[in-house]
Amino acid sequence: MDHILTEIKNKKFLLVGLGGVIFLFLTYFSFFQPTKEQDDLLLTSSSNQVVEQREVLTSDRSLSSESEQDVLVVDIKGEVKKEGVYQLPAGSRVNDAIKAAGGLTELADKKSVNLAQKLTDASVIYVASQGENISVVTPQIKTDEESQLASSKVNINQASLSDLQTISGIGAKRAQDIIDYRESNGSFQTVDDLKKVSGIGEKTFEKLRELISVD
């Protein structure tokens, strides 16, 4: 009888212990395991952080691009007190560049520069001295379309016989006439001078105008 009671007590202790373990597991999963709502909240928070980081990077790039566009780099040469390369705000004029270079020297020819001319990035400004036969050089930056158009034109001062024949409307005879004129009279000063070549009248010239250059 005592043996049976002992076994019953042992089973009761075992059941109580097992129940305690189950209770602990349930408590752990209830309080420490994230719920679906918590998972969704965590994912949403992470997504928001990624979006914010991307927005910050995009903003930084935009600011950097705007900063580059707000600055012009120009090269100032000739009769200025401090020749060199200068950074100026977008919208600056030649006069601003000269001021940045310390102003004109006493020998500067003020007529050689257009002080009101608007600057573009990578401009070169040359201030001539008095009596010097040269004008200001302030080239504008060409667009890709303009550059392609210029490169497709045939330079009639340098073109060979075969080069001239690539121009629409110019055959072997007319190409030779152009070369003969060039050898007799020197380089063409303007494209309009092409009309001086025998056989090239106004109508023919108008068809060629956009296809040729002299420099």
Image (cartoon, rainbow, N blue to C red):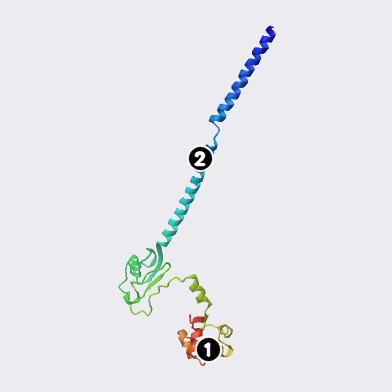
Residue at the spot 57% in from the left edge and 30% down from the top edge: 29
Q: Where 80 sits versus 50, above or below?
A: below
Quarter of the image where the N terminus is located:
top right
> SS class of the residue under badge 1?
helix
> Real-space Cα distance between discs 1 and 2?
81 Å
Residue at the spot 38% in from the left edge and 73% down from the top edge: 126
For residue 41, the mark is: 2
Report the front residue among 2 and 170: 2
Disc 2 packing (10 Å; few <14; some 14–19; many ≥20): few
Q: Where 89 sits versus 47, above or below?
A: below
Q: Where 128 sits versus 205, above or below?
A: above
Choose top left, top right, bottom left or bottom right for residue 35: top right
Report the front residue among 44 and 104: 44
Disc 1 or 2, which lies upstream in sequence?
Answer: 2
For residue 193, the mark is: none
Which mark is nearer the camera, 1 or 2? 2
Q: Position of residue 31 (x, y in %)?
A: 53, 30
Left or right? Give the position of 31 relative to 128.
right
Disc 1 packing (10 Å; few <14; some 14–19; many ≥20): many
Residue at the spot 60% in from the left edge and 23% down from the top edge: 21
Disc 2 residue type (three-letter): Leu
Q: Position of residue 188 (x, y in %)?
A: 47, 86
Report the front residue among 214 and 111: 214
Determine which residue is flagged by label 1.
178
Left or right? Give the position of 115 relative to 175.
left
> SS class of the residue under badge 2?
helix
Q: Position of residue 62 (x, y in %)?
A: 45, 57
Disc 1 residue type (three-letter): Ile
Q: How many marks?
A: 2
Left or right? Give the position of 126 relative to 215.
left
Residue at the spot 42% in from the left edge and 59% down from the top edge: 66
